Amino acid sequence: MYADKTPTQIRALIRQGEYTGNTSGLAPGYVQGNLAILPKAWADEFLQFCQLNPKPCPIIGKSSQPGQFMLPELGEDLDIRRDVPRYRVYENGELTQELTDVAEVWRDDLVTFVLGCSFSFEEALLADGLEVRNITEGVNVPMYRTNIPCRPAGRFSGTTVVSMRPMKAADAIRAVQICTRFPSVHGAPLHLGDPSLIGIADINQPDFGDAVTIKDDELPLFWACGVTPQVALEQAKPPFCITHSPGYMIVTDLKNSQLAIL
């Protein structure tokens, strides 16, 4: 019903409250983005944090001035306050609200960052004939906190969050080759195999998203994930910030092919 809609149509449905689900599989061919919105007084340090940690925090868009909520470089009539299906609002590092529209809590000092999302490389994997289990099973991708440290910047620090997709060994090798072409949407996996080596105690209990089936002949592959900056924001505890809810992205007019290299 929604898979054949354009990004502009999807954003309109979200803005009208007619679509409230996660955005995995929507608008094939188009880039989806993670969201981090925070006060100007914190924006420069956050920008530096992203620049120092490009795999989990690849910037694909940014507001040009504080308070700007229309982002024309990312999409026609794209209103960052209304066009994400579900937002999270944090105060002093604590999650205080989940909203479907943040216009009423918007402030003139807010700076928006849009970060690359793994949904872009999922499409490239599917195009090559590889299965993406969370899409097959119709659930949100499983995401986990790890012990992989991020490089700190000012008040921002933390560990990397990863997303996981299970594959057979031969498919895993191909997935690495494919995703290397997409550095601005997390690039190649950070790890494959034993989850305990990166601090994941139970792969069947993701910290975000939903568990998926892992077959006996499959390896788990772990990619850097755009939820990483959310964890950094929780730890830095800015007085106010807004993010997307994991799996509920901003759908842009940028094409995935524009982000590929080679």
Image (cartoon, rainbow, N blue to C red):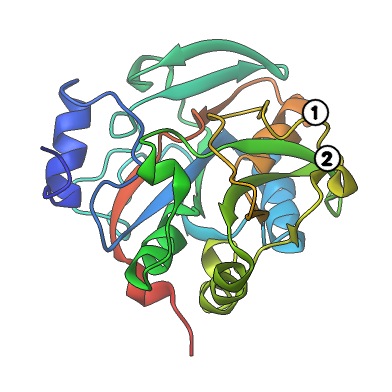
Give me the residue at 15% from left, 31% from top.
13
Where residue 138 sits, quadrant-wise, is top left
CB under 8 Å between discs 1 and 2: yes
Dot 1: element: helix
Say whether disc 1 or disc 2 marks the residue closer to the N-terminus.
2
Question: At x 69% / y 20%, what residue is drawn?
Answer: 239
Would you say 115 lies left or right of 2 here? right
Instruction: Check residue 158 in the rendering and tell me which mark sits there, or answer none.
Output: 2
Give how far across and how far down residue 128 sits, in percent. 38, 73
The circle drawn on residue 235 is 1
| Relative vertical location of residue 104 with respect to residue 22 in this rendering, above or below | above
Vertical relation: 128 (above or below) 27: below
State which quadrant residue 209 falls in.
top right
Vertical order, 22 against 45 (above or below): above
Residue 168 placement, left or right of 161 = left
| Nearest to the observer: residue 118 or residue 95 | 118
Which element is circle 2 on? Answer: loop
Where residue 129 appears, x then y in whole percent?
A: 36, 69
10 Å crowding of disc 1: few (<14), some (14-19), many (20+): some
User: For the point 49% across and 28% down, which residue is it?
Assistant: 245
Q: Is residue 63 left or right of residue 29?
A: right
Identified by mark 1, the residue type is Gln
Between 120 and 86, the one lying in front of the other is: 120
